[in-house]
């Protein structure tokens, strides 16, 4: 369901501007109004009949790509690529192939992409190191991962953040009584919470009723004292949308909101001043000192589809949003920032070299250097994203669709400290040979 945030809610659909014909008009209209699931049904009728052509194949592939069905996306990109395509089509084809572990085929499509856009940073990275997968796979493991036990069957769960008062907040589509988002045909997202017990287990999740609406709510970030929350919310809830009259659809942008906790309930909800009807702001993460808010947006001035930005926070006053620059952002998609102690930022990217789909990266914002891929097992050939880390508890949480749906997983750092000990006889002081230490 991260598709809601980095495809549908950010409204970054690829225009279907060329090759349209009368037979694809209905499907194109659905695609242009972001109704990708319905568009797929119409394009399939054309593609599997006698009316399939380059335009239909590409649109069908893009529709699957936008709902993160990379297997079907790769299948139809292959058909589309039998005739000349634009550069981004080859890049998306390469991404779809990577998500299936087909790295050599992906490199061939990246060659075609790089030939058309040689000055794009993604093209430069590919030319400099096309066969990076073996070295990435051989990196020392940074985290051990495990299941959390709170995931819902066949529904999406992600955006987990552990507060200092042992509450794990996350978002989920598990509420089947919710109305359905017609673009992806799943229930709207709600905010949930689970209590972390002393032994590290998590209680049965409960909806945070005072924060949830009839539309998408979350993900969230919480202040160090646990009493201030910033969260994302669908603009359709409070009129933060434009109307596409041609396609008869409301285009609601994601916005960020602030809430405070009073007597155990979240209240005093206020929209942030840089929300807009023209672009989305989502995926909030508040610095430990509460002075800087990081977020994802496709606002003007970015590097690509969606970028990571920051803004200063002083009580209820906010500065001017600033882009984090090219060490973090690319011409692809960046999102799900999580800022930790000492300026360490975790985020997800589809524009940096990874195993496939979205990968989790770590950047030290105090240093001028490239972000580092976390490697396996946090990352996989599928989508891995929404990584957060609680330093006090020495554990992190992230989401992955490696098992078919977006599930929340736990990550614990691997201890790599080497201890050298000498065991001596307590009375004589002589070293004891062959002593075992545990």
Image (cartoon, grey):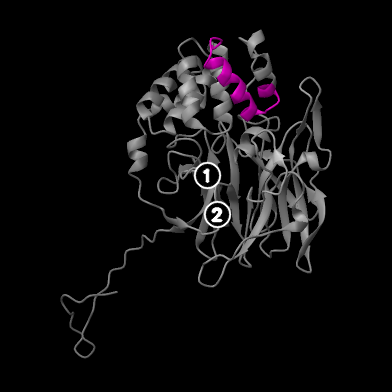
Foreground residue, 106 or 287?
A: 106
**Residue underneath mark 1:** 405
The quadrant where residue 238 appears: top right
Q: Residues within 10 Å of mark 1 (few under 14, many from 20)?
A: some
Foreground residue, 249 or 438?
A: 249
**Residue underneath mark 2:** 151
Q: Is residue 220 above or below residue 415?
A: above
Residue 163 visible (yes or no): no
Q: Position of residue 56 (x, y in %)?
A: 57, 15
Element assignment for label 1 = loop
Image quadrant holding the N terminus, namely: top right
Image quadrant holding the C terminus, namely: bottom left
Q: Is residue 100 above or below residue 188?
A: above
The rendered magenta stretch, by its main secondary structure, is classed as helix
Q: Position of residue 425 (x, y in %)?
A: 21, 85
Residue 418 located left or right of residue 153: left
Examine the structure image and report whether residue 155 is included in the region drawn in magenta. no
Q: Position of residue 157 (x, y in %)?
A: 58, 50
- The span shown in magenta is 30-52
Identify which residue is drawn at 58% across, 49% down.
158
Foreground residue, 163 or 208?
A: 208
Sequence-earlier tag: 1 or 2: 2
Identify which residue is drawn at 62% across, 62% down.
194
Q: Position of residue 233 (x, y in %)?
A: 74, 45
Q: Residues within 10 Å of mark 2 (few under 14, many from 20)?
A: many
| Callout 1 touching callout 2 (CB < 8 Å) | yes
């Amino acid at each position: 369901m991260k598709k809601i945030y980095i495809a549908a809610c950010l409204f970054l659909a690829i225009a279907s501007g060329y090759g349209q014909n009368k037979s694809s008009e209905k499907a194109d209209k659905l695609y242009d109004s972001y109704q990708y699931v319905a568009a797929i049904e119409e394009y399939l009728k054309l593609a599997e009949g006698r009316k399939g052509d380059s335009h239909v194949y590409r649109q069908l592939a893009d529709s699957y790509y936008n709902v993160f069905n990379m297997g079907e996306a790769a299948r139809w990109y292959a058909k589309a690529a039998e005739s000349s395509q634009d550069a981004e089509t080859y890049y998306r084809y390469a991404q779809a192939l990577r998500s299936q572990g087909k790295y050599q085929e992906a490199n061939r499509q990246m060659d075609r992409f790089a030939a058309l856009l040689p000055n794009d940073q993604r093209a430069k990275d590919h030319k400099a190191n096309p066969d990076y997968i073996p070295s990435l796979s051989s990196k020392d493991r940074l985290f051990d991962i495990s299941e959390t036990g709170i995931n819902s069957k066949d529904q999406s769960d992600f955006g987990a953040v552990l507060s200092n008062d042992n509450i794990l907040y996350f978002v989920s589509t598990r509420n089947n009584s919710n109305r359905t988002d017609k673009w992806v045909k799943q229930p709207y997202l709600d905010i949930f919470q689970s209590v972390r017990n002393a032994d590290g287990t998590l209680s049965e999740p409960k909806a945070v009723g005072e924060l949830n609406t009839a539309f998408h709510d979350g993900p969230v970030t919480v202040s160090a004292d646990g009493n201030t929350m910033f969260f994302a919310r669908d603009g359709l809830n409070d009129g933060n949308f434009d109307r596409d009259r041609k396609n008869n659809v409301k285009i609601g942008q994601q916005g960020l909101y602030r809430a405070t906790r009073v007597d155990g309930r979240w209240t005093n909800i206020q929209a942030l001043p840089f929300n807009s009807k023209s672009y989305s702001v989502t995926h909030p993460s508040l610095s430990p000192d509460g002075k800087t808010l990081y977020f994802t947006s496709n606002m003007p001035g970015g590097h690509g589809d969606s970028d990571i930005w920051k803004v200063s926070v002083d009580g209820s006053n906010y500065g001017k949003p600033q882009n984090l620059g090219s060490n973090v952002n690319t011409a692809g998609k960046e999102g799900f920032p999580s800022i930790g102690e000492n300026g360490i930022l975790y985020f997800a990217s589809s524009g940096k070299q990874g195993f496939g789909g979205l990968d989790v990266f770590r950047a030290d914002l105090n240093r001028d250097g490239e972000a580092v891929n976390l490697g396996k097992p946090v990352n996989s050939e599928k989508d891995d994203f929404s990584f957060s880390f609680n330093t006090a508890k020495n554990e992190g949480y992230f989401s992955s669709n490696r098992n078919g749906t977006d599930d929340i997983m736990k990550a614990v750092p691997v201890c790599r400290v080497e201890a050298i000990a000498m065991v001596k006889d307590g009375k004589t002081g002589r070293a004891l040979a062959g002593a075992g230490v545990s």
